[in-house]
Image (spheres, rainbow, N blue to C red):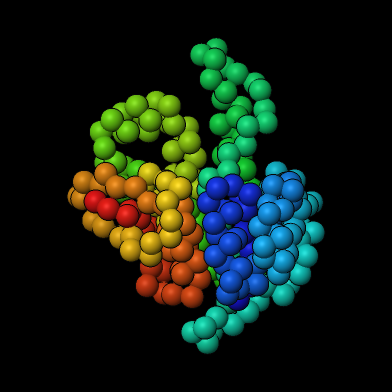
C-alpha cells in the first residue's frame, strides 16, 4: 500500500515511518529531511517529499500523487494517508497582552486546516485518512484525570485542544474513510501490541501508551474496517 505520512519528523511520525516501511510504500512529507536521515539510512525505500504544509505550492508538487490510487487488501480501490498530530510549529513570535503566543496558536490551527483541505482535494487518489489527536477530545473530554482536565486542557493546552477538536471536525466532515486515534499520555516505551483500543465515554481513563503502540494502531487501520469512521481511545493500561 502507498502511504503518505505528514508530521513525519516528529516523535510519533518517526515511529510510523519505521513500522510502515516494513510493509508499505511510504512517502514522508517533511520540511527538513535531515531530521529523519537516520531513518532514511535504515529504510532506504522511504521516499521524501520536502515541503511546508503552510505553502500550498509545495503540497501540489508532491511526487507521484496520481499513483496514490491503489487496491487495498480487502480488494477494493482506495488509498492510505497517515496524518500525525504531534509536530507543533514554534516559528512565530507575536504575543498578546497576557504574554501568550496567540499567533502561534492560530498558526497551529491554520496548519491543520490547510492540511485537511489538501487531503480533501485528493479524494480521487487517497481514500483513507488515519489521524492522531488526543484523549480528551470530543466525547472523551471528561475521561482524563481531573488535574489534567483542569490545568492542562483548561489552561496550559486550551488552544491546543481547541485546535485538535477542530481537526476532528474537519476529518469527520471530509467524506473520506477515516479513523481518529486518541491516545492517552504518550511514552517512549517499546512496542507491545497489547494496548486497549476503544473504551466507553464513562470509563475513568488514567492510562498511558507508547508512541510505538500508537503507530502500530494507526498503521493497522490502513487495511482494517474495524474502526472505520470512529474516534478510538488508546491506552496501554486503565
Q: Residue at x 42, y 51 (%)?
A: 189
Q: Position of residue 90 (x, y in %)?
A: 63, 32
Whether residue 141 is visible to the viewer of this picture, yes or no, is yes
Q: Where is residue 217 in the image (x, y as percent from the top left)?
A: 43, 63
**174 vs 92: above or below:** below
**Which quarter shows the N terminus?**
bottom right
In this picture, residue 123 sits left or right of residue 223:
right
- In front: 155, or 186? 186
Q: Residue at x 46, y 69 (%)?
A: 221
**139 vs 72: above or below:** above
- In front: 149, or 42? 42
Q: Where is residue 226 in the image (x, y as percent from the top left)?
A: 37, 72
In this picture, residue 171 sits left or right of residue 233:
right
Q: Residue at x 44, y 38 (%)?
A: 161
- In front: 144, or 142? 144
In this picture, residue 171 sits left or right of residue 232:
right
- In front: 216, or 100? 216
Q: Which residue is drawn at 72% across and 75% down?
A: 67
Furthest toward the top, the residue is: 97
Amino acid at each position: 500500500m502507498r502511504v503518505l505520512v505528514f508530521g513525519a519528523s516528529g516523535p510519533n511520525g518517526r515511529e510510523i515511518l519505521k513500522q510502515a516501511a516494513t510493509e508499505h510504500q511510504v512517502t514522508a512529507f517533511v520540511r527538513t529531511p535531515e531530521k529523519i536521515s537516520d531513518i532514511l539510512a535504515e529504510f532506504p525505500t522511504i521516499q521524501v517529499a520536502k515541503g511546508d504544509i503552510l505553502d500550498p505550492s509545495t503540497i501540489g508538487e508532491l511526487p507521484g500523487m496520481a499513483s496514490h490510487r491503489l487496491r487495498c487488501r480487502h480488494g477494493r480501490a482506495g488509498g492510505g494517508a497517515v496524518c500525525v498530530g504531534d509536530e507543533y510549529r514554534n516559528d512565530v513570535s507575536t504575543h498578546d497582552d497576557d504574554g501568550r503566543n496567540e499567533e502561534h496558536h492560530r498558526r497551529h490551527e491554520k496548519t491543520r486546516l490547510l492540511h485537511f483541505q489538501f487531503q480533501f482535494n485528493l479524494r480521487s487518489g487517497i481514500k483513507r485518512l488515519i489521524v492522531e489527536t488526543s484523549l480528551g477530545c470530543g466525547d472523551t473530554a471528561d475521561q482524563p484525570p481531573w488535574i489534567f482536565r483542569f490545568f492542562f486542557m483548561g489552561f496550559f493546552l486550551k488552544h491546543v485542544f481547541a485546535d485538535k477538536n477542530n481537526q476532528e471536525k474537519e476529518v469527520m466532515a471530509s467524506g473520506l474513510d477515516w479513523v481518529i486515534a486518541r491516545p492517552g499520555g504518550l511514552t517512549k516505551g517499546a512496542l507491545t501490541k497489547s494496548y486497549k483500543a476503544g473504551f466507553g465515554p464513562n470509563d475513568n481513563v488514567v492510562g498511558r501508551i507508547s508512541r510505538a503502540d500508537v503507530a502500530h494502531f494507526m498503521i493497522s487501520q490502513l487495511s482494517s474496517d474495524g474502526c472505520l469512521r470512529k474516534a478510538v481511545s488508546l491506552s496501554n493500561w486503565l
